[in-house]
Image (tube, rainbow, N blue to C red):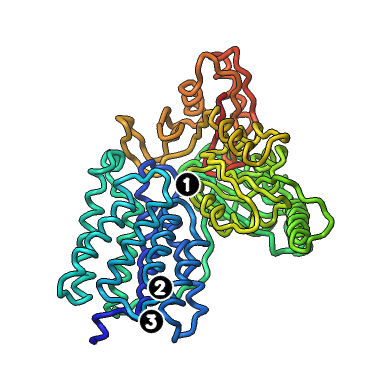
């Protein structure tokens, strides 16, 4: 048999690596295919990170590894590394395909078609309400074409070539199946990711020259700030307090009274460099974004005031934050160790894990007795393995997961399904507000199963609105949105748009509120301030005099405000 008429384990591994490489190269383009022009950047990144986890597992195999060994690593790696809805679906496609080739020494057209059918079956089964016009449609049609062509006398090269051509045609048809795609003028992002993976796998089959070496990479979440005014993320987890030379992480935005000349900007940067490090100073029109680690934040603020008004001022003591983080990690490690060792430390009947971003919001969940916070959400979806690690660290026999994001629910559910040593329940909270409301609905006298039901009902009693900025210009439901505009979003609807975030927040709340609205909570994020949030509250109070309006620090990135309406 000609080696080009079948796939062996070496070729399968190469094709998987090739598909991952092409997907990785295209992830930024795929991220931009979002229907809503919000700065989430999820699909391409999630799919790539999901596959990269399997790449790491494959790298541990010897060159002579069997087909079953390669398939098992692909299945387990993608399953545990799955992030976001697209990543979970991709992991299930890989899992089903791997199941379909068990026991096969080589793969021909017939076995490939069989495995594709099992891949689609696993993916559809993982999604509670499958929607056509998505990656599922592309996968199903690819499997159908693979089966149809498997009966001919085609070479594998021609077989794969025709399947890939058909996959591209199906992808271009997705806007006709899903009106929201057509309105936004894009194809399905998950479907695009799958096509890119298939394209890379095909080129790898053809032995085309490509870089199949991969370096370790971590998720790169979108940080706070509008486009071209970058935020900065600092990880001090690996430092000791003695290694933190400059203590105060100082950030603010200068609204310039007049444009800065090139010489003035250079002098300002020289001053910042003289009093600290980790400097970022970005000028755009009449706005300057400043980030510096310093021991003299007052001096930095004084120098900034010489150029104009300061907004979004934030000063963090990194030694204090590091100290608190070390204590929290030690407590978690001790809890986890006690579970493994079977020590006499009491184990609760029920524990809680919640996903969120923003220290203020995390503190709200901790105050509601959540045992473990997974940092993540819209811009950095946690993986299935992240959930499994969190579940293991909670000293309880049963655990309730609060994903708090619609794109995280599948990964949480996947973790619950494969956890062996604890009973895990997923309360499918779609946003932070639903998660907080669910925790308030917890009844200590109820069983874990009863509480999962009660908390889901409680989460559905609240509306959640979010104010963020548009990363591109578009038109949605006859609403024109320009790049940089602020949008007020509730669920899948854009209820307010303007250039001013506070006016957008007011418009959003007015659209969400009803005559019997009793409580409105405004969580202001890293780009907001308490002063601005209270101005929003005062303006809304005039229209809703009977409602209680509270303002709280959320500290979340990307979303200027998160608003709960009850």
Dot 3 falls on a residue whose secondary structure is: helix
Dot 2 falls on a residue whose secondary structure is: loop
Q: To which residue does mark 2 refer?
A: 102
Towards the viewer: 220 or 389:
389
Q: Are marks 2 and 1 in contact (CB under 8 Å)?
A: no
Q: Residues within 10 Å of mark 1 (few under 14, many from 20)?
A: many
Left or right: 342 as drawn, with respect to 468: right
Q: To which residue does mark 3 refer?
A: 10
Asked if residue 247 shows in the view, the reply is no
Select label 2 or label 3 by which is in front. Answer: 2
| Residue 323 point in image, percent of width and height | 77, 55
Which picture quadrant has residue 487? top left
Left or right: 442 as drawn, with respect to 89: right
Towards the viewer: 440 or 118:
118
Location of the N terminus (image quadrant): bottom left
Whole-angstrom CA distance, mark 1 to mark 3, is 34 Å
Q: Which mark is residue 189?
A: none
Earlier in the chain: of badge 1 and badge 3, it is: 3
Q: To which residue does mark 1 refer?
A: 407
**What residue appears at the point 69 percent right and 64 percent down from the top-left corner?**
238
| Residue 249 point in image, percent of width and height | 68, 51
Whole-angstrom CA distance, mark 2 to mark 3, is 15 Å
């Amino acid at each position: 048999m000609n080696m080009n008429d079948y796939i062996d384990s070496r070729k399968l591994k190469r094709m998987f690596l090739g598909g991952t490489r092409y997907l990785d190269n295209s992830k930024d383009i795929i991220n931009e295919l979002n229907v809503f022009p919000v700065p989430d950047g999820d699909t391409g990144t999630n799919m790539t990170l999901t596959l990269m986890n399997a790449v790491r597992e494959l790298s541990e195999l010897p060159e002579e590894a069997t087909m079953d060994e390669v398939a098992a690593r692909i299945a387990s790696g993608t399953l545990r590394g799955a992030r976001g809805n697209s990543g979970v679906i991709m992991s299930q496609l890989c899992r089903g395909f791997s199941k379909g080739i068990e026991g096969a020494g080589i793969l021909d057209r017939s076995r490939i078609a069989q495995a594709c059918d099992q891949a689609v079956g696993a993916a559809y089964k993982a999604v509670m309400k499958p929607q056509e016009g998505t990656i599922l449609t592309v996968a199903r049609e690819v499997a159908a074409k693979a089966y149809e062509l498997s009966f001919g006398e085609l070479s594998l090269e021609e077989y794969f070539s025709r399947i890939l051509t058909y996959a591209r045609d199906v992808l271009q048809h997705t806007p006709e199946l899903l009106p929201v795609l057509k309105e936004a003028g894009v194809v399905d992002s998950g479907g695009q990711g799958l096509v890119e993976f298939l394209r890379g796998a095909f080129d790898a089959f053809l032995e085309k020259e490509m870089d199949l070496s991969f370096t370790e990479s971590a998720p790169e979440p979108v940080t706070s700030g509008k486009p071209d005014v970058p935020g900065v993320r600092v990880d001090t987890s690996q430092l000791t307090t003695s290694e933190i030379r400059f203590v105060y992480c100082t950030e603010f935005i200068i609204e310039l009274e007049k444009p800065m000349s090139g010489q003035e900007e250079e002098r300002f940067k020289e001053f910042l460099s003289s009093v600290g490090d980790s400097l970022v100073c970005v000028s755009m029109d009449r706005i300057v974004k400043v980030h510096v680690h310093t021991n003299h934040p007052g001096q930095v603020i004084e120098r900034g005031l010489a150029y104009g008004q300061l907004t979004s001022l934030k000063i963090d003591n990194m030694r204090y934050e590091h100290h608190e983080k070390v204590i929290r990690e030690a407590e978690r490690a001790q809890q986890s160790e006690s579970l493994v060792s079977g020590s006499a430390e009491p184990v609760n009947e029920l524990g809680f894990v919640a996903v969120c971003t923003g220290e203020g919001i995390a503190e709200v969940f901790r105050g509601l007795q959540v045992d473990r916070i997974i940092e993540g959400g819209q811009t950095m979806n946690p993986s299935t393995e992240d959930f499994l690690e969190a579940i293991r660290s909670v000293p309880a026999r049963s655990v309730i997961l609060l994903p708090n994001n619609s794109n995280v629910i599948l990964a949480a559910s996947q973790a619950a399904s494969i956890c062996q040593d604890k009973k895990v329940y997923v309360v499918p909270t779609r946003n932070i507000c639903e998660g907080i409301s669910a925790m308030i609905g917890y009844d200590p006298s109820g069983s874990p199963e009863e509480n999962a039901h009660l908390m889901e009902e409680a989460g559905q009693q609240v509306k959640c609105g979010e104010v963020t900025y548009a990363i591109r210009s578009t038109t949605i439901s006859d609403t024109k949105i320009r790049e940089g505009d602020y949008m007020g979003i509730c669920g899948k609807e854009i209820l307010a748009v303007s250039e001013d975030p506070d006016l957008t927040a007011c418009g959003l709340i007015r659209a969400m509120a009803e005559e019997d609205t009793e409580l409105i909570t405004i969580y202001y994020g890293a780009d907001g301030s308490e002063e601005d949030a209270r101005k929003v509250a005062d303006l809304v109070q005039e229209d809703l005099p009977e409602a209680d309006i509270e303002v709280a620090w959320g500290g979340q990135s990307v979303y200027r405000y998160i608003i709960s309406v009850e």
